[in-house]
Amino acid sequence: MARQALGKAAMLVFQRDLTLAWRRWDEVTQPLIFYVVVTTLFPLATTPDLSQLRVISGGVIWVAALLSSLLALESLFRTDVEDGTMEQWVLSGQPLGWLLLSKVASHWMLTGLPLVVISPIVGTALGLPYEAWGTLIVSLLLGTATLSLLGGIGAALTVGVRRGSVLLSLLVLPLAMPLLIFGARAVTMRMDGDSPAGPLQLLAAIFFLALSLGPLAMSAAIRISVES
Amino acid sequence: MDLKEFLHMGGYAGFVWTAYGLTTLILVANWWAARRKEAVELIDARRRVRFQKESRQ
Amino acid sequence: MWTWFHKLASPPHAYRILGRLAPWFGWPALVLILTAAYWGLVRAPTDYQQGDAFRILYVHAPAAWMSMFIYVSMAIAAGVGLIWRIKLAHAAAAASAPIGASFTFLALATGSIWGKPMWGTWWVWDARLTSELILFFLYLGYMALRASFDDPQRADRASAVLAIVGVINVPIIHYSVEWWSTLHQPASVTKFDKPSIALPMLIPLFIMIAGYQFYYGWALCRRLRGEILSRERKATWLDKDS
């Protein structure tokens, strides 16, 4: 009975977030545009030569994805904390972790998933060969999902802080460096003809770790931010 | 090894002495900062106690 | 036994004990550090490969060790404070952070200085140095988060969550950076490895580590007293103390 109620609550949260996002869809598209703009910066800053860009394409795509995910994360909890919804959730007696996980999931669908979808196009613009698309997509799926979880912790910690987005980036980026190393490397390895299985597996391991511990840390952080 | 050789550090004087000098600097700075923190907080706490006593009268 | 512990953690008690404990850390620290410095600079034999430049090891490696040790200690203290709601533990974490960050900075700076005569560049993306750099960012993030809260209790608890998340991440970061750095130098030894150094050359290293540990103890005692005071609302017990 309680589990039914929890599942229903989580689903409601998920649906409601998607509906809200639909009404403010510029919040969803802005990180996406940022992603494309940032990747454009690199050829402008270095060279138009695709054969040279190709070498750093994996890294550039990943860095751009990282930065635009961070940008999007700032809005994850802000509105719900501001209008008191979060306080209600904390007091509701429902396991907070599940509700927050539901929020993170919907947020990822709206911000992380679009990045993954257009990444082959962006990659091609940087000289990434077609063979590496699979690895690129898998690595970014795992990476953006993990980042949503990690970033969720950071967002929960900084939700009340003025100009918290810079602090959020400062907190999350060092923690996200392993993701960057494994993800970007996987793409480059595939490009060079090697098997990317190793780093992809490590990426998956980190994702599952984040999935299991993330909601715990997030709910602790939200409770701290909301109790005042 | 005489003093001149010692200071010369086999040609690496600049590197060795900068490293050790920086170390000394950081250790002294932390020493100073720790004492200062303690002192500042003590002054602050005493001021709070005085204020509380006065406001109670 | 709990009563003893709770008494120990009570602010006036802790404040007094820390005050008396400090010199027991401070003087040995001074002696050990000076001894290690003398031994390392004067008595240790010159390395046939690196000449006198290797003496930088004696300040670099202990600093790197302390940076890690303090971070873990900080995270443990923060965890204890968060789980058992012990203010003293939170205070210990807060007091440790700047000390740990200083050692991290020192490890980076001395590592960089050592790199120039040895490998020709002021910076090298070696596994150890890169890990130290990321650790430095973790320290800075922790201190920045603390500073962003006005309410000290919130600062304590939020930064505790961050410290715990950070310390779980540290092995992952180390492994990933290690993996990343070996991709370009498969079989070679990482630059700051100590392959097989003769024992007489290692003695000053251990003495310096001991010295730094005692130094941390001293600095922690003093800073912690300050932190305890800042968390006390009604420090009326102060008048009976000095």
Image (cartoon, coloured by chain):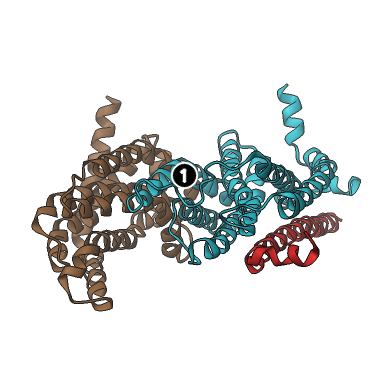
Chain colours: A brown, B red, C cyan
Q: Is residue C165 visible?
A: yes
The residue at 81%/55% (across/down) is B42
**Front residue of this view, candidates C214 and C219:** C214
How many numbered circles are shown? 1
Which residue occupies the extreme left position in the image?
A130
Q: Residues within 10 Å of mark 1 (few under 14, many from 20)?
A: many
Q: Is residue A151 visible?
A: no
The picture places residue A14, in percent across and down from the top left corner, at 23, 46
Subunit bearing disc 1: C
Amino acid under disc 1? Val
Q: Is residue A139 left or right of residue C56?
A: left
The picture places residue B37, in percent across and down from the top left corner, at 75, 58
Asked if C172 appears above or below B10 in the picture, the reply is above
Asked if A23 appears above or below C28 in the picture, the reply is below
**Front residue of this view, candidates C188 and A141:** C188
The residue at 77%/52% (across/down) is C38
Which image quadrant for residue A61? bottom left
**Front residue of this view, candidates A122 and C62:** C62
The residue wearing badge 1 is C170
Q: Secondary structure beneath disc 1?
A: helix
The picture places residue A149, in percent across and down from the top left corner, at 34, 46
Which image quadrant for residue B52? bottom right
Picture quarter with the N terminus of chain A: top left
The residue at 17%/67% (across/down) is A126
The picture places residue C229, in percent across and down from the top left corner, at 75, 50
Which image quadrant for residue B26? bottom right
**Front residue of this view, candidates C86 and C172:** C172
Q: Is residue C237 left or right of residue B13?
A: right
